[in-house]
């Protein structure tokens, strides 16, 4: 090895990403928490970190201390944070408006949590277009990674580990080479402890440096490769973490190596070569994945795969809706519309998660998951954006009214009620409240549209049907799965039997075994409108059930009527859950601790202490001594969940009425 004063610069980039769902809990347990604890024990080892916006918001909600650990690493100069698209949608696959929204949203989240604006950009899935240069630069970023094969396609003949620039429409961007050989060698270190091959590679690159050159070798991979993928393959997360820990200890002793960050390197180095134009490129792994699915390459997949085509049309439609409301909001000074628009754009970005990505595999063939498949909630739920936009458009000028409209174009016609300043959106599926908004303040009261369970099958935004294919994932987070997240969602039991349409509602011991029960909340009911009342009806074996909504000054009364028209005595159980999501977007920014709940006899109170938004739900019917009643508070991600359980006997030709009152923005007692 040459005796040089210069050092070989080595940059390790770890990329962490999850959709905003309950898998975050499991991923943190087997990977993220342990990773950050380990690297913080090596303060001399500097790292570049990218965490997607969906994962950052999930971390902030579930465990804010993870955000604090990252922030401390930044403040200590150990971490450089990269920006990106918020939910790792691929720039090449999306329209310009969506790309700009994604990039800006991720920057906002980083600035909110860490108090600074990132300078480096993580390019999702490594695809390339020269148009990226303008888009990335105009959003304030100065450097990014690029695969070596793209440089060769541009005619680069010099050493791969030099730092370069490129340009487009007068905008410049610094390029660091994504070294795929380095990637493979690091994989062997993490999985097999093969340190010698890695050090040998570093020495070879070091020896190739001339006196006027200083190379930079980068490694960029998923943080999940240090724990999460091993567990998915029934291997040891602890051994992978220990192998990386031991590598860091080894490298700390090598004086000819400098573990650095991109930002630190650029403070005293300048790029050595300029590339005028780089042809369009596709990531190596996505070409391979696309070809296994019968496509020529990823470009073919991106253009022709039915799921991509389907969602691209959906996203184009939704982005036009957003722009229409956005243009109107910009011309007005309507604070409520502006806040609802912000919520809509965040929700929209959540459900573009990894859009354009080729099929991936987390572990074995058994656990492969198809990205962007038609009929999966992770992308179809973007339709919920239309509910937010509809509320925003009504907030400019509203009046008391009741009307029907399929707002989200999912085939289910909702009934919209505006009473005073409160908008209710009610579905005939279960006769439940899908969303509720305060049109004066621009806040969500019911809905919980920012969070959804992984791989839930999508029928409509009113229906629920679970179908998971990650056995290892679900075992650790099953207890957090919440089938019911809306308003006035019911299970009804007659004698020993649930009534309603058959529905998969919870997993049993094995991945393939499901508990399938009739569920009233998932059943289409007959609907009638009578003045300011909405009545839903259901008949079961001479038992007539009516669920009637009425509205007064923004408040909502719901009366359940059980009419036994046969000659049977029955034991009835009404299990009704009321799920508030009071200004839930603020919980993504400030954590779950902003929610406070209280129970008092037959009344439940919910409060968002940050936004000062309150609501309550009461059973106002006086129960008899023979009735059994229980009210409990249950877990709900991004909200407050209250379960009313009422058991009563219904004699032949008898009738029972139970009335609830929901009051919005009531001060807590």
Image (cartoon, rainbow, N blue to C red):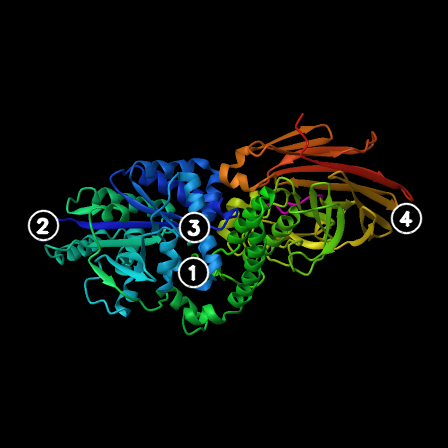
Kindly indicate whether the residue at mark 3 contacts the one at mark 4 (C-beta within 8 angstroms). no
Residue projecting furthest to the top? 669
Q: Which mark is residue 4?
A: 2
Quadrant of the rendered structure where residue 56 is? Answer: top left
Indicate the secondary structure of the residue bearing disc 1. Answer: helix
Distance, label 2 to label 1, CA atoms, is: 41 Å
Depth order, front residue of 371/527: 527
Q: Earlier in the sequence, mark 3 or mark 2?
A: 2
Indicate the secondary structure of the residue bearing disc 2. Answer: loop
Quadrant of the rendered structure where residue 282 is? Answer: bottom left
Distance, label 1 to label 4, CA atoms, is: 61 Å
Q: Which residue is mark 4?
A: 565
Depth order, front residue of 534/375: 534
Q: Is residue 499 visible?
A: no
Residue at 26%, 57% (x, y): give it.
182
Q: Nearer the viewer, mark 4 or mark 2?
A: 2
Crowd rating for badge 1 (residues with CA inside 10 Å; few <14, some 14–19, many 20+): many
Distance, label 4 to label 3, CA atoms, is: 56 Å
Distance, label 4 to label 2, CA atoms, is: 95 Å
Q: Nearer the viewer, mark 1 or mark 4?
A: 1
Determine the main secondary structure of the stretch shown in magenta. Answer: loop
The quadrant the C terminus occupies is top right
Q: Which residue is mark 1?
A: 91
Q: Earlier in the sequence, mark 4 or mark 3?
A: 3
Q: Earlier in the sequence, mark 4 or mark 2?
A: 2
Counting from the top left corner in percent of width and height, residue 162 is at 21, 58
Write the start and end of the magenta stretch as one range.
482-488
Q: Which mark is residue 17?
A: 3
Q: Nearer the viewer, mark 2 or mark 1?
A: 1
Q: Earlier in the sequence, mark 2 or mark 1?
A: 2
């Amino acid at each position: 090895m040459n005796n040089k004063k210069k050092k070989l610069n080595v940059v390790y980039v770890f990329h962490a990403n999850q959709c905003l769902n309950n898998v975050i809990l499991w991923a943190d347990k087997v990977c993220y928490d342990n990773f950050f604890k380990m690297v913080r024990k090596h303060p001399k080892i500097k790292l570049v970190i990218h965490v997607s916006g969906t994962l950052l918001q999930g971390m902030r909600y579930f465990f804010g201390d993870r955000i604090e650990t990252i922030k401390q690493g930044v403040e200590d100069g150990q971490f450089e944070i990269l920006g990106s698209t918020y939910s790792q949608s691929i720039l090449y696959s999306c329209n310009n408006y969506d790309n700009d929204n994604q990039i800006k949203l991720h920057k906002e989240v980083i600035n909110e949590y860490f108090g600074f604006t990132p300078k480096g950009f993580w390019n999702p899935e490594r695809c390339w277009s020269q148009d990226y240069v303008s888009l990335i630069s105009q959003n304030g970023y100065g450097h990014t990674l690029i695969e070596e094969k793209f440089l060769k396609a541009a005619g680069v003949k010099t050493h791969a580990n030099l730092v370069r620039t490129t340009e487009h429409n007068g905008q410049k961007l610094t390029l660091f080479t994504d070294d795929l050989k380095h990637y493979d060698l690091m994989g062997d270190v993490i999985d097999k402890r093969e340190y010698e091959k890695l050090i040998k590679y570093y020495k070879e690159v070091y020896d190739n440096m001339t006196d006027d050159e200083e190379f930079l070798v980068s490694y960029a991979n998923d943080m999940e490769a240090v724990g999460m993928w091993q567990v998915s393959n029934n291997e040891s997360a602890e051994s992978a973490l220990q192998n990386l820990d031991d590598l860091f200890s080894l490298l700390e002793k090598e004086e000819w190596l400098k573990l650095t960050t991109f930002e630190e390197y650029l403070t005293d180095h300048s790029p050595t070569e300029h590339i005028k134009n780089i042809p369009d490129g596709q990531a190596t792994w996505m070409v391979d994945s696309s070809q296994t699915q019968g496509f020529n390459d990823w470009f073919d997949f991106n253009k022709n795969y039915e799921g991509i085509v389907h969602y691209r049309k959906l996203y184009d439609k939704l982005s036009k809706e957003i722009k229409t409301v956005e243009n109107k909001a910009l011309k007005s000074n309507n604070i409520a519309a502006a806040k609802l628009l912000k919520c809509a754009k965040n929700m929209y970005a959540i459900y573009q998660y990894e859009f354009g990505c080729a099929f991936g595999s987390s572990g074995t063939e058994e656990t492969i998951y198809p990205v962007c498949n038609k009929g999966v909630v992770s992308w179809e739920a973007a339709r919920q954006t239309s509910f937010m936009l509809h509320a925003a458009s009504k907030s400019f000028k509203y009046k008391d009214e009741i009307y029907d409209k399929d707002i989200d174009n999912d085939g289910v016609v909702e009934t919209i009620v505006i009473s005073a300043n409160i908008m209710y959106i009610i579905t005939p599926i279960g006769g439940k409240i899908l969303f509720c908004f305060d049109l004066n303040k621009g806040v969500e009261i019911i809905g919980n549209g920012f969070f959804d369970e992984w791989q839930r099958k999508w029928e409509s935004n009113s229906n629920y049907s679970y179908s998971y294919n990650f056995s290892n994932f679900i075992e650790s987070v099953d207890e957090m799965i919440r089938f019911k997240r809306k308003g006035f969602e019911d299970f009804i039991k007659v004698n020993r039997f649930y009534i309603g349409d058959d529905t998969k509602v919870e997993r049993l011991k094995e991945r393939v075994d499901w508990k399938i029960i009739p569920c009233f909340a998932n059943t289409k009911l007959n609907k009638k409108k009578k003045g300011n009342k909405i009545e839903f009806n259901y008949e079961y074996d001479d038992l007539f059930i009516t669920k009637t909504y009425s509205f007064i000054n923004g408040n909502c009364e719901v009366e359940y009527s059980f009419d036994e028209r046969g000659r049977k005595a029955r034991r009835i159980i009404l299990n009704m859950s009321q799920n508030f999501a009071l200004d839930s977007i603020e919980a993504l920014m400030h954590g779950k601790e902003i929610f406070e709940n209280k129970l008092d006899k037959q009344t439940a109170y919910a409060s968002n202490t940050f936004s000062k938004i309150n609501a309550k739900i009461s059973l106002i019917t006086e129960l008899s001594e023979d009735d059994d009643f229980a009210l409990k508070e249950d877990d709900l991600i991004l909200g407050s969940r209250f379960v009313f359980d009422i058991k009563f006997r219904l004699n032949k030709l008898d009738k029972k009425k139970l009335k609830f009152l929901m009051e919005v923005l009531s001060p807590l007692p």
